[in-house]
Image (tube, helix red, strand yellow):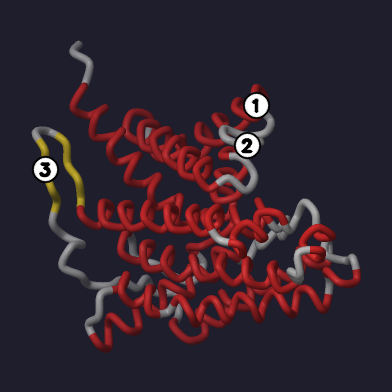
């Protein structure tokens, strides 16, 4: 029997495109969990919120969902800053962020989900855009635009975040805030303010990821639960706080899931992908590009 080269090539390409989407979904967790050490379990809920805002504007005004997400970035940034302020005053300042802080984010997750169910019900919602249907074909390799465009915009997003974190004063302060807060104070930087900015950025990325999600698939309020395990797995696999590592890990996980789903069935994909995570951490506990 001939080896299905065409099928394998399409599975790898589909995995790369899926990995680009996973990178956008994980970007906020890489900042909140990987850099700030805040276990924001509610991050997928903010992604779903971004999906529904894109849906509302797209349905009523016909605007492109990704464009809507870019317009909503400031609003999500402010929302993230407000959430962190409540978290800091209620838990972090008192040294109770470990368990009670985790419960706080679980509460946000379920409150957001229940609120969306009450407003929109449990029906799947979708958006319309000119690039959702067409497919670009190179020889025997298919590139669906609904996956290609989110992947490219996601990589651009990760590049912008990496440049911001490494080339600006506030970005470098964000990278340092979990390591030496005293040094930040000596440089006239308030660690709480830096953390608030960083958490606001992490939630702002959820607006873009939410638009990508509803472009790729129809959504309903509880669909975000499917990504809780994946985003933390990618964050750890890539290396805590490493955005390039996040991209590499997301691509690797996407390829493994796509190949497994193509040749062995979709039900095996999560088990195999998390098996890769365990093997990687067994031989390199810091992750792929971790320090």
State the separation of the CA atoms marked 2 and 1. Answer: 9 Å
Q: Residues within 10 Å of mark 2 (few under 14, many from 20)?
A: some
Residue 101's place in the image compared with 165, above or below, is below
Instruction: Return the x and y of residue 226 as percentages of the image width and height.
Output: 52, 55
* Residue at mark 3: 137
- Counting residues from the N terminus, which is met first, the one under dot 1 or under dot 3? 3
Instruction: Return the x and y of residue 113 as percentages of the image width and height.
Output: 56, 74
- In the image, farthest residue toward the left: 139
Image quarter hosting the C terminus: top right
Taking the spot 44% from the left edge, 83% from the top edge, the residue there is 120
* Residue at mark 1: 284
Q: Residues within 10 Å of mark 3 (few under 14, many from 20)?
A: few
Taking the spot 55% from the left edge, 68% from the top edge, the residue there is 201
Dot 1: element: loop
* Residue at mark 2: 290
Q: Quadrant of residue 79?
A: bottom right
Taking the spot 54% from the left edge, 76% from the top edge, the residue there is 77
Instruction: Return the x and y of residue 283 as percentages of the image width and height.
Output: 65, 22
State the separation of the CA atoms marked 2 and 3. Answer: 36 Å
Dot 2: element: loop
Image quarter hosting the N terminus: top left
């Amino acid at each position: 029997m001939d080896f299905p080269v065409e099928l394998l090539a399409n599975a790898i390409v589909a995995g790369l495109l899926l990995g680009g989407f996973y990178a956008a979904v994980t970007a906020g967790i890489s900042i909140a969990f990987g850099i700030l050490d805040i276990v924001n379990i509610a991050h997928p809920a903010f992604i779903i919120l971004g999906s529904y805002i894109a849906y509302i504007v797209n349905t009523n005004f016909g605007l492109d969902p990704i464009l809507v997400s870019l317009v909503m970035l400031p609003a999500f940034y402010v929302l993230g800053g407000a959430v962190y302020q409540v978290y800091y005053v209620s838990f972090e300042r008192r040294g109770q962020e470990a368990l009670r802080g985790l419960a706080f984010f679980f509460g946000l997750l379920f409150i957001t989900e229940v609120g969306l169910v009450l407003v929109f019900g449990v029906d799947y919602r979708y958006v319309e855009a000119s690039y959702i249907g067409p497919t670009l074909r190179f020889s025997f390799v298919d590139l669906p635009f609904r996956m290609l465009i989110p992947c490219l915009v996601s990589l651009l997003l990760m590049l912008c975040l990496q440049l911001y974190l490494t080339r600006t004063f506030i970005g470098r302060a964000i990278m340092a805030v979990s390591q030496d807060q005293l040094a930040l104070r000596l440089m006239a930087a308030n660690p709480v303010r830096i953390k608030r900015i960083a958490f606001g950025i992490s939630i702002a990325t959820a607006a873009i990821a939410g638009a990508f999600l509803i472009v790729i698939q129809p959504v309903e309020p509880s669909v975000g639960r499917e990504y809780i395990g994946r985003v933390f797995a990618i964050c750890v696999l890539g290396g805590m706080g490493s955005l390039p590592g996040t991209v590499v890990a997301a691509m690797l996980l996407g390829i493994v899931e796509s190949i497994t789903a193509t040749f062995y069935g979709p039900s095996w994909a999560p088990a195999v992908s998390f098996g890769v995570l365990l093997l990687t951490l067994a031989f390199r506990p810091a992750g792929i590009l971790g320090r």
